[in-house]
């Protein structure tokens, strides 16, 4: 019993032990950023890899979570845990409400309608609600957050531990999701929606639930960003960075469990290193993206995984490779 | 509302709509025929604008500059088509979208490398103003509108009167049958892609004197252009024209009522239209797959 549970979790634990090891080698802000960023990308990875929906508007949901946490911490309370919880709940509420409208659309329209939502969010936060959000100046609440007993989120080193635990749980959740009937339904609706209908499942409900799960995860990442920086400005919903989650999803490997993590490490590292050496790192990111796509869209983890599987006795531990349509 | 303000607002909206139309027509054609979402059209737009600026500074003749910008943009699109898109036409539509986004980002990086980060001003070629109902209106904006209408007429004639155009229209309906008739569809694809690139470059060249030319300009209009294509319905030329002018007017008149509305109102309208008609105003059900 315990043994099989350990085996089930071992892949995830190994992956995050590696990240915890990175913490020793890398500066702390870098490790924190990687963790939050990979949670952010995880939502889009699920959306694109499982249901086949690509979204250029993830910053919108990031903003929902971030601003929910920020409003609470700036105006009402002091406890960062409540802020994160509120971010999660706000994400859940928003996605439940707008999900039915969005998931009816075809994948390409879906991508662009989400982009539109991100633009609306940006101007809403920057101009229309400027009285509450303080416009471009943003909300600063780092000093307002109080220390909490067990894991003190106001300290970056303990924030890292919290985020690491949260990420392990999330990855476990997504791994579990892949094994359920619902996970199979998601893949099925991506491949052939007519057949799913014949089997008696509702495409609409499958997609709606997937939308809610994925973008609640994104909102959670948003609230983590808010608590980590102690500062939220409209910049977080900026549509200029709308491509980041898409790029990282592809870079890591679409639909693979560890793709977002690998992609986040590679992308953040690349940006960090390249931007120090050269100004226009966009050129390399774009070039790399095209190369990966031409090489067969498997991404870094998608390419590495079969290589890792062969010589090591990890066969049963690592999850099945991401599907390719 | 003040009548003078209203008239200049309408003219502003019309000229913005014209620029959007020129950009969106390329996207729309590429989607209709090749079933690709070609975000890199925004790159050709920036290339057109930058070359217009450069040639204008070098020679002083803006009309020649616009022409050079459009042609070079077309040449760049030909290169990209040969090396990137030619290999991926058969792939999934989201696949092409991501690839073209990579091309766009890479291109923006290249532009930053060549021209630097500082926004550049291009000179307005026609300084004259005419009076419409007592309101002074810049002639250049009227010329832009006239050119967009000419392009619309030209492309309609091309699609309806020439063999190549008819083949492209047939290809939009069913590309396999066109191939079955012995027509080389890949040549059609190349022609369409380059035509789209030239129009995007033209849009950039014409837009350059109205705004500052900066590396991010493609990304700035990206959302608006996509909105135009989506409201009009992917693959429909007429729908693109109608929705381009609709979006132009909503942006322009919206900003007269309440400034933040300028950026948000078009998106709200798009959401509304898509929720009623998920394929856009003129998008046909046939294209659904």
Image (cartoon, helix red, strand yellow):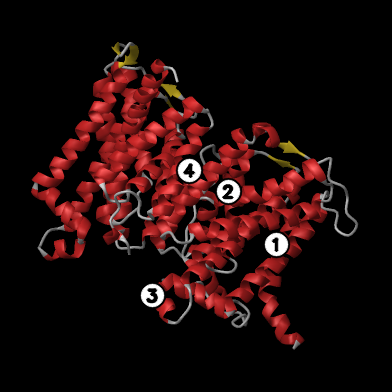
Give me the C-alpha separation between circle 4 and circle 1: 42 Å
Of callouts 1 and 3, the N-terminal one = 1
CA separation in Å, label 3 and label 4: 31 Å
Instruction: Residue at 49% x, 55% y: name it.
Output: A55
Res B49 → quadrant? top left
Q: Which residue is mark 1?
A: A19
As drawn, the label of residue A194 is 3
Mark 3 or 4: in front is 4
Crowding at mark 4 (Cα within 10 Å: few <14, some 14-19, many 20+)? some
Locate residue B247, reporting x and y percent: 38, 37
Front residue (pair A83, B101): A83
Question: In the displayed image of the protein, which residue is found farthest to the front?
Answer: B1
**SS for dot 2:** helix
| Residue holding disc 2 | A59
Callout 3 secondary element: helix
Q: Chain of mark 4?
A: B
Which of the two discs, 4 and 1, sits closer to the camera?
A: 4
4 or 2: mark nearer the eye: 4
Q: Are marks 4 and 1 on the same chain?
A: no
Are the residues tagged 4 and 1 within 8 Å (C-beta)?
A: no
Residue at position x 29%, y 60% from top? Answer: B285
Q: Is residue A130 visible?
A: yes
| Image quadrant where residue A318 sits | bottom right
Position of B153 with respect to B98 (left or right) is: left
Tell me, yes or no, whether the two marked residues, 3 and 2, touch with CB atoms within 8 Å.
no
Q: Are marks 3 and 2 on the same chain?
A: yes
What chain does mark 3 sit on?
A
Q: Does A252 sit above or below residue A138? A: below
Please name the residue that numbered disc 4 is placed on.
B268
Front tag of 3 and 2: 3
Label 2 resides on the chain identified as A
């Amino acid at each position: 019993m315990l043994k099989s549970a350990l085996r089930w979790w071992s892949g995830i634990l190994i992956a995050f032990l590696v990240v915890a090891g990175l913490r020793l080698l890398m500066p702390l802000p870098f490790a924190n950023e990687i963790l939050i960023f990979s949670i952010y990308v995880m939502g889009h990875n699920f959306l694109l890899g499982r249901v086949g929906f690509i979204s250029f508007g993830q910053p919108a949901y990031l903003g929902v979570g971030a601003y929910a946490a920020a409003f609470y911490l700036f105006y009402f309370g002091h406890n960062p845990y409540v802020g994160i919880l509120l971010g999660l709940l706000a994400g859940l509420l928003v996605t439940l409400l707008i999900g039915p409208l969005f998931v009816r659309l075809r994948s390409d329209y879906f991508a662009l309608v989400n982009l539109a939502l991100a633009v609306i969010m940006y101007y809403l936060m920057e101009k229309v609600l400027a009285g509450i959000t303080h416009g471009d100046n943003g909300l600063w609440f780092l000093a307002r957050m109080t220390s909490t007993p067990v894991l003190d989120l106001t300290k970056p080193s303990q924030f890292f531990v919290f985020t690491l635990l949260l990420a392990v749980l999330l990855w476990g959740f997504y791994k579990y999701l892949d094994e359920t009937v619902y996970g199979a339904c998601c893949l099925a609706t991506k491949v052939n929606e007519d057949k799913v209908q014949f089997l008696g499942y509702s495409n609409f409900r499958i997609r709606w639930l997937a939308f809610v799960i994925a973008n609640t995860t994104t909102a959670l990442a948003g609230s983590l960003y808010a608590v980590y920086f102690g500062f939220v400005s409209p910049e977080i919903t900026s549509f200029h960075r709308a491509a980041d989650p898409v790029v990282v999803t592809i870079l890591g490997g679409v639909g693979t469990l560890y793709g977002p993590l690998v992609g986040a490490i590679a992308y953040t590292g690349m940006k960090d290193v390249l931007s120090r050496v050269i100004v226009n790192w966009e050129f390399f990111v774009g070039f790399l993206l095209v190369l990966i796509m031409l090489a067969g869209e498997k991404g870094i983890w998608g390419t590495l995984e079969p290589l890792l599987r062969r010589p090591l006795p990890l066969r049963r531990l690592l999850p099945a490779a991401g599907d390719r349509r | 509302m003040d009548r003078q303000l209203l008239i200049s607002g309408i003219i502003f909206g019309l000229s913005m709509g014209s620029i959007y139309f020129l950009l969106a027509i390329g996207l729309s054609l590429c989607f209709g025929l090749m079933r690709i979402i070609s975000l890199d059209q925004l790159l050709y737009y920036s290339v057109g604008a930058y070359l217009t600026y450069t040639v204008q500074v070098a020679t002083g003749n803006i009309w020649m500059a616009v022409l050079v910008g459009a042609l070079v943009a077309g040449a760049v699109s030909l290169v990209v088509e040969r090396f990137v898109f030619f290999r991926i036409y058969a792939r999934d539509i989201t696949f092409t979208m991501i690839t073209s986004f990579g091309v766009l980002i890479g291109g923006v990086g290249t532009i930053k490398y060549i021209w630097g980060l500082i926004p550049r001003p291009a000179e307005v070629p026609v300084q004259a103003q005419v009076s419409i109902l007592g309101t002074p209106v810049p002639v250049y904006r009227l010329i832009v509108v006239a050119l967009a209408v000419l392009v619309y007429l030209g492309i309609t004639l091309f699609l309806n009167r020439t063999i190549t155009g008819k083949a492209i229209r047939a290809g939009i309906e069913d590309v396999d049958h066109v191939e079955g008739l012995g027509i080389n569809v890949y040549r059609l694809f190349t022609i369409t892609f380059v035509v789209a690139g030239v129009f995007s470059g033209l849009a950039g060249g014409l837009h350059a004197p109205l705004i500052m030319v900066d590396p991010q300009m493609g990304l700035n209009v990206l959302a608006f252009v996509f909105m135009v294509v989506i409201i009009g319905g992917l693959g429909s030329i007429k729908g693109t024209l109608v929705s381009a002018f609709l979006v132009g007017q909503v942006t322009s008149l919206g900003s007269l009522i309440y400034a933040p509305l300028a950026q948000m109102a078009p998106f709200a309208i798009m959401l509304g239209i898509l929720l009623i008609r998920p394929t856009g105003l003129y998008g046909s059900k046939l294209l659904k797959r």
